[in-house]
Image (spheres, rainbow, N blue to C red):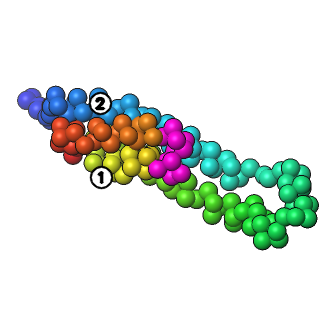
């Protein structure tokens, strides 16, 4: 009764890879949290009803050009809200995806993309707050030992 069990091979333990994962974990988690919060905020702002009473002074102002009123009306319409929030949803989704890849040392390209998007205040999560993990990640990602740690 000689049964052999397939024992999986021990994972490769590479100290430099472990160090790179440790170094990247905090900025990656910050990216994930910021992108997640901004993604949720965008979703909520897209589906939250607009308080038209607060906009009455704007629309009733005779000095306001009709083009501006039309633009605001379109932006507050369901299609306008989708069009204005969709880029934020997509960009924050990309940042979260790249942050996850960075945390797991899986894709250098996605990690670098997420770090760059974080450095663009109007594109990244949480506006200017995202500069911190973005720049931090760029500095770490350009180190040769960190670059070599990615699969």
- The residue sitting at 85% across, 54% down in the picture is 55
Main structural element of the magenta stretch: helix, strand or loop? Answer: loop
Q: Is residue 136 visible?
A: yes
Location of residue 18 by image quarter = top left
**Residue labelled with disc 1:** 109
**Badge 1 density bin: few <14, some 14–19, many ≥20, Cα 10 Å:** few
Separation of marks 1 and 2 at Cα, in angstroms: 18 Å
Find the residue positioned furthest to the bottom.
67
Q: Which is nearer the eye, 123 or 44?
A: 123
**Residue labelled with disc 2:** 23
Looking at the figure, which quarter contains the N terminus?
A: top left
Specify the segment rendered in magenta: 120-130
The tag on residue 118 is: none
Q: Which is nearer the eye, 51 or 134?
A: 134
Of the image marks 1 and 2, the number of the one nearer the N terminus: 2
Q: Whole-percent x and y of residue 145?
A: 18, 37
**Badge 2 density bin: few <14, some 14–19, many ≥20, Cα 10 Å:** some
Residue 12 inside the magenta-drawn segment: no
Q: Whole-percent x and y of residue 91?
A: 49, 54
- The residue sitting at 76% across, 63% down in the picture is 72
Q: Whole-percent x and y of residue 24?
A: 32, 34
């Amino acid at each position: 009764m000689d049964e052999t069990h397939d024992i999986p091979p021990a994972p490769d333990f590479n100290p430099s890879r472990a160090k790179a994962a440790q170094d990247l974990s905090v900025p990656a988690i910050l990216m994930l949290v910021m992108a997640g919060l901004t993604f949720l905020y965008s979703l909520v702002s897209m589906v939250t009803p607009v308080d038209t009473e607060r906009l009455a002074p704007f629309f009733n102002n005779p000095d306001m050009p009709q083009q501006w009123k039309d633009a605001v009306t379109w932006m507050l319409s369901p299609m306008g809200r989708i069009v204005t929030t969709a880029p934020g949803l997509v960009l924050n989704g990309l940042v979260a995806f790249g942050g996850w890849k960075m945390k797991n040392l899986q894709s250098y390209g996605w990690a670098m993309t997420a770090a760059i998007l974080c450095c663009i205040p109007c594109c990244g999560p949480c506006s200017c707050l995202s500069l911190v993990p973005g720049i931090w990640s760029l500095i770490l990602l350009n180190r040769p030992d960190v670059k070599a740690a990615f699969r």
